[in-house]
Image (tube, rainbow, N blue to C red):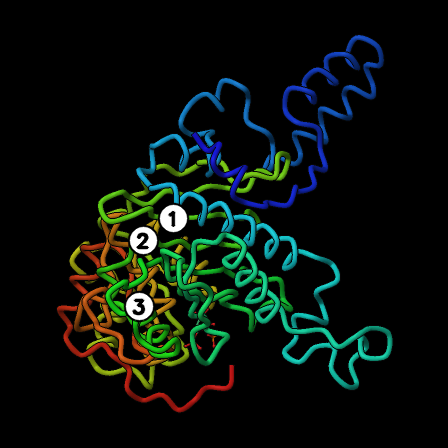
Amino acid sequence: MLSHLSSQTTIPPLPTSRPSPPSLLRLRLRLRLTQPRVAASLSISSEMSSASTPLHAEQYEKKEGKTLLEFVGSGQAHVDDDLAVLLAHVQTACKRIAALVASPFNNEIGKSGGGGKGSSLDSSRDAQKPLDIISNEIILASLKSSGKVAAMASEEDEFPVWISDKGPFVVVTDPLDGSRNIDASIPTGTIFGVYRRLEEIDHLPTEEKAQLNSLQSGTRLVAAAYVLYSSATIFCASFGPGKGTHAFTLDQSIGEFVLTHPDMKVPPRGQIYSVNDARYFDWPEGLRQYIDTVRQGNGQTGKKYSARYICSLVADLHRTLLYGGIAMNPRDHLRLVYEANPLSFLVEEAGGRGSDGKHRILAIQPVKLHQRLPLFLGSKGDMLELESYGNIQQKVNPGYEV
Ligand SMILES: O=P(O)(O)OC[C@H]1O[C@](O)(COP(=O)(O)O)[C@@H](O)[C@@H]1O
Protein backbone atom coordinates (compact mmCIF):
# COMPACT_ATOMS: atom_id res chain seq x y z
CA MET A 1 0.00 0.00 0.00
CA LEU A 2 2.88 2.36 0.66
CA SER A 3 4.58 1.73 -2.66
CA HIS A 4 4.02 5.39 -3.56
CA LEU A 5 6.28 6.34 -0.67
CA SER A 6 9.35 4.77 -2.18
CA SER A 7 8.98 6.66 -5.43
CA GLN A 8 8.13 10.06 -3.90
CA THR A 9 10.22 10.23 -0.77
CA THR A 10 13.89 10.14 0.04
CA ILE A 11 14.11 8.48 3.42
CA PRO A 12 17.74 7.94 4.36
CA PRO A 13 18.42 4.40 5.61
CA LEU A 14 18.70 4.14 9.37
CA PRO A 15 21.55 2.18 10.87
CA THR A 16 20.50 -1.18 12.27
CA SER A 17 23.00 -2.07 14.92
CA ARG A 18 21.58 -5.50 15.66
CA PRO A 19 20.49 -8.38 13.45
CA SER A 20 16.82 -8.49 12.51
CA PRO A 21 14.63 -10.80 14.63
CA PRO A 22 14.63 -13.87 12.38
CA SER A 23 18.41 -13.75 11.83
CA LEU A 24 19.01 -13.28 15.57
CA LEU A 25 16.91 -16.34 16.28
CA ARG A 26 18.74 -18.36 13.63
CA LEU A 27 22.11 -17.24 15.00
CA ARG A 28 21.15 -18.23 18.54
CA LEU A 29 19.94 -21.61 17.37
CA ARG A 30 23.15 -22.27 15.44
CA LEU A 31 25.30 -21.20 18.36
CA ARG A 32 23.29 -23.28 20.79
CA LEU A 33 24.13 -26.34 18.73
CA THR A 34 27.80 -25.49 18.36
CA GLN A 35 28.97 -23.22 21.20
CA PRO A 36 26.68 -23.43 24.22
CA ARG A 37 28.50 -20.80 26.31
CA VAL A 38 28.47 -18.13 23.59
CA ALA A 39 24.84 -18.93 22.93
CA ALA A 40 24.02 -18.43 26.60
CA SER A 41 25.72 -15.03 26.75
CA LEU A 42 23.97 -13.93 23.56
CA SER A 43 20.71 -14.96 25.10
CA ILE A 44 21.43 -12.98 28.28
CA SER A 45 22.43 -9.82 26.45
CA SER A 46 19.33 -9.87 24.28
CA GLU A 47 17.10 -10.43 27.28
CA MET A 48 18.80 -7.67 29.27
CA SER A 49 17.93 -5.15 26.59
CA SER A 50 14.27 -6.06 26.84
CA ALA A 51 13.22 -2.46 26.08
CA SER A 52 14.28 -3.07 22.49
CA THR A 53 13.72 -6.82 22.33
CA PRO A 54 12.33 -7.51 18.87
CA LEU A 55 8.79 -8.73 18.63
CA HIS A 56 8.31 -12.31 17.49
CA ALA A 57 7.17 -12.90 13.95
CA GLU A 58 3.63 -13.80 14.99
CA GLN A 59 3.33 -10.55 16.94
CA TYR A 60 4.29 -8.60 13.84
CA GLU A 61 1.34 -10.25 12.12
CA LYS A 62 -0.98 -8.78 14.70
CA LYS A 63 -2.00 -5.15 14.85
CA GLU A 64 0.24 -4.48 17.87
CA GLY A 65 3.46 -5.12 15.97
CA LYS A 66 2.68 -2.98 12.93
CA THR A 67 5.15 -0.27 12.14
CA LEU A 68 3.90 3.29 11.96
CA LEU A 69 4.24 3.24 8.18
CA GLU A 70 2.45 -0.11 7.91
CA PHE A 71 -0.36 1.17 10.12
CA VAL A 72 -0.68 4.36 8.12
CA GLY A 73 -0.36 2.59 4.77
CA SER A 74 -2.61 -0.36 5.54
CA GLY A 75 -5.69 1.81 5.66
CA GLN A 76 -6.16 1.31 9.41
CA ALA A 77 -5.32 4.94 10.10
CA HIS A 78 -7.64 6.15 7.29
CA VAL A 79 -5.22 8.78 6.06
CA ASP A 80 -4.84 9.94 2.49
CA ASP A 81 -1.61 9.40 0.54
CA ASP A 82 -0.42 12.99 1.06
CA LEU A 83 -0.65 12.67 4.84
CA ALA A 84 1.03 9.25 4.74
CA VAL A 85 3.99 10.74 2.89
CA LEU A 86 4.19 13.64 5.34
CA LEU A 87 4.12 11.27 8.33
CA ALA A 88 6.88 9.17 6.77
CA HIS A 89 9.12 12.21 6.66
CA VAL A 90 8.16 13.48 10.10
CA GLN A 91 8.92 10.16 11.78
CA THR A 92 12.34 10.05 10.16
CA ALA A 93 13.09 13.55 11.45
CA CYS A 94 12.10 12.41 14.94
CA LYS A 95 14.41 9.39 14.76
CA ARG A 96 17.22 11.78 13.96
CA ILE A 97 16.31 13.99 16.92
CA ALA A 98 16.08 10.92 19.16
CA ALA A 99 19.61 9.95 18.14
CA LEU A 100 20.78 13.49 18.74
CA VAL A 101 19.38 13.87 22.26
CA ALA A 102 20.81 10.48 23.21
CA SER A 103 24.22 11.21 21.75
CA PRO A 104 27.20 11.29 24.10
CA PHE A 105 28.38 14.36 22.20
CA ASN A 106 25.39 16.58 22.98
CA ASN A 107 26.64 17.64 26.38
CA GLU A 108 27.94 20.97 25.16
CA ILE A 109 25.48 21.34 22.30
CA GLY A 110 22.51 21.11 24.63
CA LYS A 111 23.52 24.16 26.60
CA SER A 112 22.03 27.36 25.37
CA GLY A 113 24.76 28.97 23.30
CA GLY A 114 26.85 25.84 23.78
CA GLY A 115 29.97 25.87 21.69
CA GLY A 116 30.12 29.63 21.69
CA LYS A 117 33.08 31.67 22.78
CA GLY A 118 34.80 30.24 25.79
CA SER A 119 33.20 26.82 25.58
CA SER A 120 35.30 23.74 25.20
CA LEU A 121 33.97 23.23 21.69
CA ASP A 122 34.91 26.68 20.56
CA SER A 123 38.60 26.03 20.13
CA SER A 124 38.32 22.69 18.33
CA ARG A 125 35.22 22.88 16.17
CA ASP A 126 32.86 25.32 14.54
CA ALA A 127 30.39 26.87 16.96
CA GLN A 128 27.60 24.38 17.71
CA LYS A 129 23.95 25.27 17.87
CA PRO A 130 21.69 24.37 20.79
CA LEU A 131 19.72 21.18 20.30
CA ASP A 132 16.36 22.92 19.92
CA ILE A 133 17.72 24.91 16.97
CA ILE A 134 19.24 21.82 15.37
CA SER A 135 15.96 19.95 15.89
CA ASN A 136 14.13 22.81 14.20
CA GLU A 137 16.43 22.55 11.20
CA ILE A 138 15.97 18.77 11.03
CA ILE A 139 12.21 19.15 11.00
CA LEU A 140 12.23 21.96 8.45
CA ALA A 141 14.45 19.90 6.13
CA SER A 142 12.15 16.89 6.44
CA LEU A 143 9.03 18.95 5.73
CA LYS A 144 10.69 20.51 2.70
CA SER A 145 11.75 17.16 1.30
CA SER A 146 8.28 15.69 1.80
CA GLY A 147 6.92 18.02 -0.86
CA LYS A 148 3.68 18.09 1.12
CA VAL A 149 3.99 21.24 3.23
CA ALA A 150 3.07 24.80 2.40
CA ALA A 151 4.20 26.40 5.68
CA MET A 152 5.85 25.53 8.95
CA ALA A 153 5.28 27.53 12.14
CA SER A 154 7.71 26.72 14.92
CA GLU A 155 8.47 27.83 18.43
CA GLU A 156 11.99 28.50 17.22
CA ASP A 157 11.06 30.94 14.45
CA GLU A 158 9.56 34.37 15.00
CA PHE A 159 7.45 34.02 11.87
CA PRO A 160 6.12 31.02 9.95
CA VAL A 161 8.33 29.77 7.11
CA TRP A 162 6.66 29.51 3.71
CA ILE A 163 7.85 26.33 2.00
CA SER A 164 5.81 25.65 -1.12
CA ASP A 165 2.70 27.07 -2.84
CA LYS A 166 1.57 23.57 -3.71
CA GLY A 167 1.98 21.87 -0.33
CA PRO A 168 -1.41 20.61 0.90
CA PHE A 169 -0.49 20.95 4.61
CA VAL A 170 0.58 23.47 7.21
CA VAL A 171 2.63 22.13 10.13
CA VAL A 172 2.95 23.78 13.54
CA THR A 173 5.66 22.44 15.83
CA ASP A 174 7.65 22.75 19.00
CA PRO A 175 10.76 20.90 17.79
CA LEU A 176 12.26 20.10 21.20
CA ASP A 177 10.20 20.90 24.26
CA GLY A 178 11.76 20.57 27.70
CA SER A 179 15.23 21.33 26.36
CA ARG A 180 16.02 23.48 29.40
CA ASN A 181 16.57 20.21 31.31
CA ILE A 182 18.43 18.36 28.61
CA ASP A 183 21.85 18.52 30.23
CA ALA A 184 20.42 16.29 32.98
CA SER A 185 19.10 13.77 30.42
CA ILE A 186 15.54 14.46 31.50
CA PRO A 187 12.92 13.44 28.89
CA THR A 188 12.18 15.87 26.08
CA GLY A 189 9.64 15.86 23.29
CA THR A 190 8.63 17.10 19.86
CA ILE A 191 5.09 18.31 19.23
CA PHE A 192 3.33 18.55 15.85
CA GLY A 193 -0.01 19.77 14.57
CA VAL A 194 -1.08 19.39 10.93
CA TYR A 195 -3.65 21.57 9.14
CA ARG A 196 -4.76 21.72 5.53
CA ARG A 197 -3.52 24.73 3.60
CA LEU A 198 -6.27 27.34 3.30
CA GLU A 199 -6.64 27.40 -0.48
CA GLU A 200 -9.05 30.31 -0.32
CA ILE A 201 -6.20 32.64 0.70
CA ASP A 202 -3.66 31.38 -1.85
CA HIS A 203 -3.82 34.79 -3.56
CA LEU A 204 -2.54 36.72 -0.50
CA PRO A 205 1.08 37.86 -0.11
CA THR A 206 3.34 35.09 1.22
CA GLU A 207 3.87 36.48 4.73
CA GLU A 208 0.19 37.11 5.24
CA LYS A 209 -0.96 33.70 4.07
CA ALA A 210 1.79 32.00 6.09
CA GLN A 211 0.55 33.77 9.21
CA LEU A 212 -3.16 33.10 8.62
CA ASN A 213 -2.58 29.45 7.74
CA SER A 214 -0.68 29.01 11.01
CA LEU A 215 -3.37 30.63 13.13
CA GLN A 216 -6.09 28.11 12.33
CA SER A 217 -8.30 27.01 15.20
CA GLY A 218 -7.46 23.67 16.83
CA THR A 219 -10.83 22.33 15.67
CA ARG A 220 -9.38 22.29 12.13
CA LEU A 221 -6.44 20.01 12.96
CA VAL A 222 -6.24 17.04 10.59
CA ALA A 223 -3.52 15.26 12.61
CA ALA A 224 -1.40 15.80 15.69
CA ALA A 225 1.49 14.00 17.33
CA TYR A 226 4.07 14.18 20.03
CA VAL A 227 7.30 12.25 20.22
CA LEU A 228 8.70 11.47 23.65
CA TYR A 229 12.47 11.02 23.94
CA SER A 230 12.93 9.08 27.15
CA SER A 231 13.96 5.56 28.17
CA ALA A 232 11.90 4.67 25.11
CA THR A 233 11.16 6.88 22.13
CA ILE A 234 7.40 7.03 21.64
CA PHE A 235 5.52 8.48 18.67
CA CYS A 236 1.98 9.21 19.83
CA ALA A 237 -0.37 10.35 17.10
CA SER A 238 -3.91 10.97 16.08
CA PHE A 239 -4.54 10.80 12.36
CA GLY A 240 -7.70 12.88 12.39
CA PRO A 241 -10.89 13.73 14.25
CA GLY A 242 -12.62 10.58 15.48
CA LYS A 243 -9.63 8.38 14.58
CA GLY A 244 -8.32 7.91 18.12
CA THR A 245 -4.86 8.25 19.62
CA HIS A 246 -2.23 5.58 18.99
CA ALA A 247 1.30 5.25 20.30
CA PHE A 248 4.24 3.61 18.55
CA THR A 249 7.51 2.74 20.29
CA LEU A 250 10.84 2.91 18.50
CA ASP A 251 12.16 -0.64 18.15
CA GLN A 252 15.90 0.01 18.06
CA SER A 253 16.59 -3.40 16.56
CA ILE A 254 14.81 -2.53 13.33
CA GLY A 255 14.87 1.28 13.51
CA GLU A 256 11.08 1.51 13.22
CA PHE A 257 8.23 2.78 15.36
CA VAL A 258 5.94 -0.18 16.13
CA LEU A 259 2.39 0.07 17.39
CA THR A 260 2.42 -0.58 21.12
CA HIS A 261 -0.58 1.40 22.41
CA PRO A 262 -3.46 1.16 19.89
CA ASP A 263 -6.48 3.36 20.59
CA MET A 264 -5.26 4.81 23.88
CA LYS A 265 -7.88 5.94 26.36
CA VAL A 266 -7.03 8.26 29.21
CA PRO A 267 -8.69 6.74 32.32
CA PRO A 268 -11.84 8.71 33.23
CA ARG A 269 -10.27 9.33 36.65
CA GLY A 270 -6.68 9.28 37.82
CA GLN A 271 -4.99 9.77 41.15
CA ILE A 272 -2.16 12.06 40.10
CA TYR A 273 -1.84 15.80 39.68
CA SER A 274 1.13 17.24 37.84
CA VAL A 275 2.04 20.87 38.49
CA ASN A 276 4.98 23.02 39.58
CA ASP A 277 4.04 23.01 43.24
CA ALA A 278 6.60 25.70 44.17
CA ARG A 279 4.20 28.22 42.66
CA TYR A 280 1.54 27.43 45.29
CA PHE A 281 1.64 30.90 46.82
CA ASP A 282 1.15 32.52 43.41
CA TRP A 283 -1.88 30.35 42.63
CA PRO A 284 -5.44 31.69 42.85
CA GLU A 285 -7.68 30.47 45.66
CA GLY A 286 -9.60 27.95 43.50
CA LEU A 287 -6.50 26.08 42.39
CA ARG A 288 -5.07 25.98 45.90
CA GLN A 289 -8.34 24.62 47.23
CA TYR A 290 -8.52 21.92 44.57
CA ILE A 291 -4.97 20.72 45.18
CA ASP A 292 -5.40 20.86 48.98
CA THR A 293 -8.62 18.87 48.65
CA VAL A 294 -7.39 16.04 46.41
CA ARG A 295 -4.05 15.63 48.16
CA GLN A 296 -5.98 15.01 51.40
CA GLY A 297 -8.34 12.55 49.74
CA ASN A 298 -11.37 14.82 50.16
CA GLY A 299 -12.22 15.20 46.47
CA GLN A 300 -15.00 13.50 44.52
CA THR A 301 -13.18 10.17 44.30
CA GLY A 302 -12.30 10.11 48.00
CA LYS A 303 -8.76 9.03 47.08
CA LYS A 304 -5.53 10.72 48.14
CA TYR A 305 -3.81 12.04 45.04
CA SER A 306 -0.07 11.91 44.39
CA ALA A 307 2.09 14.57 42.76
CA ARG A 308 4.33 13.89 39.76
CA TYR A 309 6.08 16.69 37.89
CA ILE A 310 8.88 16.09 35.41
CA CYS A 311 8.75 19.70 34.13
CA SER A 312 8.78 18.42 30.58
CA LEU A 313 5.39 18.85 28.98
CA VAL A 314 5.40 15.86 26.64
CA ALA A 315 6.62 13.51 29.38
CA ASP A 316 4.09 14.81 31.91
CA LEU A 317 1.32 14.43 29.36
CA HIS A 318 2.38 10.96 28.27
CA ARG A 319 2.19 9.72 31.86
CA THR A 320 -1.21 11.40 32.25
CA LEU A 321 -2.56 9.68 29.12
CA LEU A 322 -1.50 6.33 30.52
CA TYR A 323 -2.36 6.70 34.21
CA GLY A 324 -4.96 9.46 34.25
CA GLY A 325 -5.18 12.57 36.41
CA ILE A 326 -4.26 16.08 35.30
CA ALA A 327 -1.10 17.60 33.81
CA MET A 328 -1.26 21.35 34.28
CA ASN A 329 0.62 24.58 33.98
CA PRO A 330 -1.75 27.20 35.37
CA ARG A 331 0.28 30.25 34.37
CA ASP A 332 0.47 31.93 30.95
CA HIS A 333 3.52 30.01 29.86
CA LEU A 334 2.79 27.29 27.32
CA ARG A 335 1.90 28.15 23.75
CA LEU A 336 -1.53 27.71 22.18
CA VAL A 337 -0.63 27.10 18.54
CA TYR A 338 2.09 24.45 18.63
CA GLU A 339 1.81 23.03 22.18
CA ALA A 340 -1.68 23.31 23.67
CA ASN A 341 -3.66 22.69 20.47
CA PRO A 342 -1.92 19.52 19.22
CA LEU A 343 -1.74 18.06 22.74
CA SER A 344 -5.40 18.86 23.46
CA PHE A 345 -6.36 17.20 20.20
CA LEU A 346 -4.53 14.03 21.25
CA VAL A 347 -6.10 14.11 24.71
CA GLU A 348 -9.60 14.58 23.32
CA GLU A 349 -9.07 11.78 20.82
CA ALA A 350 -8.14 9.63 23.83
CA GLY A 351 -11.38 10.59 25.59
CA GLY A 352 -9.93 13.25 27.88
CA ARG A 353 -10.30 17.01 28.14
CA GLY A 354 -8.06 20.02 27.43
CA SER A 355 -8.85 23.45 28.86
CA ASP A 356 -7.27 26.79 29.73
CA GLY A 357 -9.26 26.67 32.97
CA LYS A 358 -12.25 28.39 31.40
CA HIS A 359 -12.59 27.26 27.79
CA ARG A 360 -11.99 24.18 25.69
CA ILE A 361 -8.50 24.68 24.22
CA LEU A 362 -9.47 23.63 20.68
CA ALA A 363 -12.20 26.26 20.55
CA ILE A 364 -9.84 29.17 21.29
CA GLN A 365 -9.10 31.17 18.14
CA PRO A 366 -5.35 31.95 18.03
CA VAL A 367 -4.52 35.58 17.37
CA LYS A 368 -0.73 35.42 17.67
CA LEU A 369 1.70 32.67 16.71
CA HIS A 370 3.50 32.59 20.05
CA GLN A 371 0.43 33.24 22.23
CA ARG A 372 0.68 31.79 25.75
CA LEU A 373 -2.07 30.44 28.00
CA PRO A 374 -2.73 28.31 31.10
CA LEU A 375 -3.00 24.64 30.17
CA PHE A 376 -4.88 21.80 31.87
CA LEU A 377 -5.00 18.36 30.22
CA GLY A 378 -6.26 15.06 31.51
CA SER A 379 -8.98 12.71 32.68
CA LYS A 380 -12.47 14.01 32.03
CA GLY A 381 -13.74 13.46 35.57
CA ASP A 382 -10.73 15.09 37.20
CA MET A 383 -10.78 18.01 34.77
CA LEU A 384 -14.46 18.75 35.39
CA GLU A 385 -13.89 18.59 39.14
CA LEU A 386 -10.92 20.97 38.90
CA GLU A 387 -12.82 23.43 36.66
CA SER A 388 -15.71 23.47 39.12
CA TYR A 389 -13.40 25.41 41.49
CA GLY A 390 -13.73 28.33 39.05
CA ASN A 391 -10.67 30.38 39.79
CA ILE A 392 -7.74 28.24 38.62
CA GLN A 393 -5.73 30.42 36.20
CA GLN A 394 -2.54 31.77 37.76
CA LYS A 395 -2.28 35.42 36.78
CA VAL A 396 0.66 36.19 39.11
CA ASN A 397 3.65 35.27 36.99
CA PRO A 398 6.79 36.93 38.26
CA GLY A 399 9.11 35.36 35.67
CA TYR A 400 10.63 32.46 37.53
CA GLU A 401 14.30 31.74 37.02
CA VAL A 402 14.10 27.92 37.05
O1 LIG B 1 8.39 26.73 34.80
P1 LIG B 1 7.13 25.94 34.69
O2 LIG B 1 5.93 26.81 34.83
O3 LIG B 1 7.09 24.79 35.65
O4 LIG B 1 7.07 25.41 33.19
C1 LIG B 1 7.55 24.15 32.80
C2 LIG B 1 7.12 23.88 31.42
O5 LIG B 1 7.89 24.66 30.55
C3 LIG B 1 8.44 23.86 29.53
O6 LIG B 1 9.75 23.56 29.88
C4 LIG B 1 8.39 24.60 28.24
O7 LIG B 1 9.01 25.85 28.45
P2 LIG B 1 9.96 26.46 27.35
O8 LIG B 1 9.11 26.55 26.10
O9 LIG B 1 10.38 27.79 27.88
O10 LIG B 1 11.09 25.48 27.19
C5 LIG B 1 7.60 22.60 29.55
O11 LIG B 1 8.26 21.48 29.01
C6 LIG B 1 7.29 22.46 31.00
O12 LIG B 1 6.12 21.72 31.17
Which residue is drawn at the image coordinates 75% and 62% (left, top)? 105
Is residue 172 or residue 205 the one in the foreground?
Answer: 205
Which residue is drawn at the image coordinates 40% and 57% (left, top)? 167
**Label 3 environment density (alpha carbons within 10 Å; few <14, some 14–19, many ≥20):** some
Residue highlighted by disc 2: 346
In what quadrant does ligand 1 lie? bottom left
Residue highlighted by disc 3: 202
Which residue is drawn at the image coordinates 50% and 58% (left, top)? 143
Say which quadrant the N terminus sits in: top left
Q: Earlier in the sequence, mark 3 or mark 1?
A: 3
Mark 3, mark 1: which one is toward the viewer? 3
Give residue 350's position: percent from left, percent from top.
27, 48
Query: Are the two marked residues, 2 and 3, in contact with CB atoms closer than 8 angstroms?
Result: no
Per the model, the C-alpha gap separating discs 1 and 2 is 7 Å
Q: Secondary structure at mark 1?
A: strand
Give residue 75's position: percent from left, percent from top.
34, 32
Residue highlighted by disc 1: 237
Which residue is drawn at the image coordinates 27% and 62% (left, top)? 199
Per the model, the C-alpha gap separating discs 2 and 3 is 29 Å
Is residue 94 or residue 163 the one in the foreground?
Answer: 163
